Image: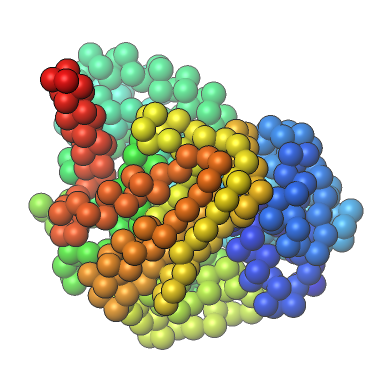
Amino acid sequence: MRKLLVANRGEIAVRVIRAARELDVRTVAVCSETDTEALHVRMADEHVVIGPAPAARSYLDADAVVAAAVRLRADAVHPGYGFLSERAAFAQQVIDAGMTFVGPSPEAIHLMGDKALARSTAARAGVPTVPGSDGPLTDVDSALETAGHVGYPIAVKAAAGGGGRGIRIVRSPAELREALPLAQAEAKAAFGSGEVYLERFVHNARHIEVQVFGDGERFVHLGERDCSLQRRRQKVVEEACAPNIPAQVRQDMTNAAVSLAAAASYSGAGTVEFLYDSARQEFFFIEMNTRIQVEHPVTEMVTGRDLVREQLTVAAGTPLSFTQEQVEPRGHALEFRLNAEDPAAGFMPSPGTITGMRMPGGPFVRIDSGCEQGSQVSPFYDSLIAKLIVWGDTREAALARARRALDEIEVRGVATTAPFLRSLVDLPEFAEADYHTTFLESWMAGRASDRDAAGRAA
């Protein structure tokens, strides 16, 4: 691998470019017309404009990306996360053009990308799955029959969905009759497939995911992460290792993740996601993400392993550089997603120019960002400005470091979620890791009610 095209933008493009540079691999950045002065563009050895600002006409244009890679004689393509990263057809297109796709095979992407197919694969591999339909549903009668066996409430999920999108929760047969055709139409519009399936809705579940890695022959895990603090099913804070998980559950969950990776003959970095019912100490497979995750840095911090570098070397044909016995998580890490959004205005996006930006530093503080002073936060893309990652030898030490680091953040020109993130760290429930996937939204709703009541009293 001599030249790598990075088919992404923002912080993940910067992250990949840095890893490639350490391996003495030249890089090509792709960019839209509005991103020509972006940090990832200026860091790369070469860049190419592939289309106008809308992602559908630039970063999501597979033909333009592959054509650019061929024209500039890249040996490989790294898709990052989002955009084209989990599209089997894109991976195949890269391979057919004579280049290396940095990720799993198109077959593995398809297998795990179809949520209903992934669910059946997991069941065959002995991985616990949430009770639900055996495959995609086509009509209301079969959906009602399945729901009757599983019980309400139940989740209607898009088979091709992901990232918390394409999910509807229904609590009665009448709601299901109404929701099924709407869910199918939404799935078709959002993901190109109208297939949906049903799963039991697990109350007060925690979202635990296991980082796996394979080279097609050997498969390992690098521990688990807790991603339960979510808003609108989008992760806000992640941590490794997951707190308050019994040792036997942790072992069973990580073993299950490795079994699934082996069943898919997996190569590269992947994440197996589970719902964990802490009351019953049960876990259930929900999906596998066939790419590097936004929250991969917390795993890197506790294991000392560079996952992106490992992606590149494995894709180049080198076997995994470590064994399962060599993975020894140490300490605790937290990641906070800093977005250009205004919490006081319902988290409305806050596009504009960053006129000033100071990020925290100090021991065991890491900033992954594609922005700097003068950067444009575009309304066309995700509003992520930076990821703050902190490590401590204990969870308490990591929380103390997070408080200090969040206090140091200073961004001018756009509103950010920094004050919101700082308020989270002081919550007793956060300190005790006593939360679940709907906790954050319930807490936010309570704060809004308190503000409304105070306003009426005034």
Residue at image location 33% in from the left, 68% down from the top: 401
Along the line of sight, which residue is nearer the eye, 1 or 302?
302
Position of the C terminus, as image quadrant, is: top left
Q: Position of residue 233 (x, y in %)?
A: 36, 39
Position of the N terminus, as image quadrant, is: bottom right
Vertical arrangement, residue 3 with respect to residue 206, above or below: below
The structure's colour scheme is: rainbow
Vertical arrangement, residue 313 with respect to residue 404, above or below: below
Quick one: which residue is furthest to the left in this view?
Answer: 279
Answer yes or no: is residue 301 visible.
yes
Residue 47, located in which quarter of the rendered image? bottom right
> With 356 as the anchor, is 390 left or right in this view?
left
Q: Position of residue 76 (x, y in %)?
A: 74, 63
Q: How many marks?
A: 0
Quick one: which residue is furthest to the right in this view?
Answer: 71
> With 432 as the anchor, is 100 left or right in this view?
right
Residue at image location 47% in from the left, 19% down from the top: 185
Residue at image location 47% in from the left, 23% down from the top: 186
Q: Position of residue 93 (x, y in %)?
A: 74, 49
Quick one: which residue is furthest to the front in this view?
Answer: 458
Residue 447, located in which quarter of the rendered image? top left
Vertical arrangement, residue 274 with respect to residue 154, above or below: below
Along the line of sight, which residue is nearer the eye, 64 or 177?
64
> With 165 as the anchor, is 155 left or right in this view?
left
Answer yes or no: is residue 241 visible.
no
Residue at image location 31% in from the left, 61% down from the top: 403
Along the line of sight, which residue is nearer the eye, 431 or 214?
431
> With 181 as the anchor, is 69 left or right in this view?
right
Q: Position of residue 374 (x, y in %)?
A: 66, 49
Along the line of sight, which residue is nearer the eye, 191 or 12?
12
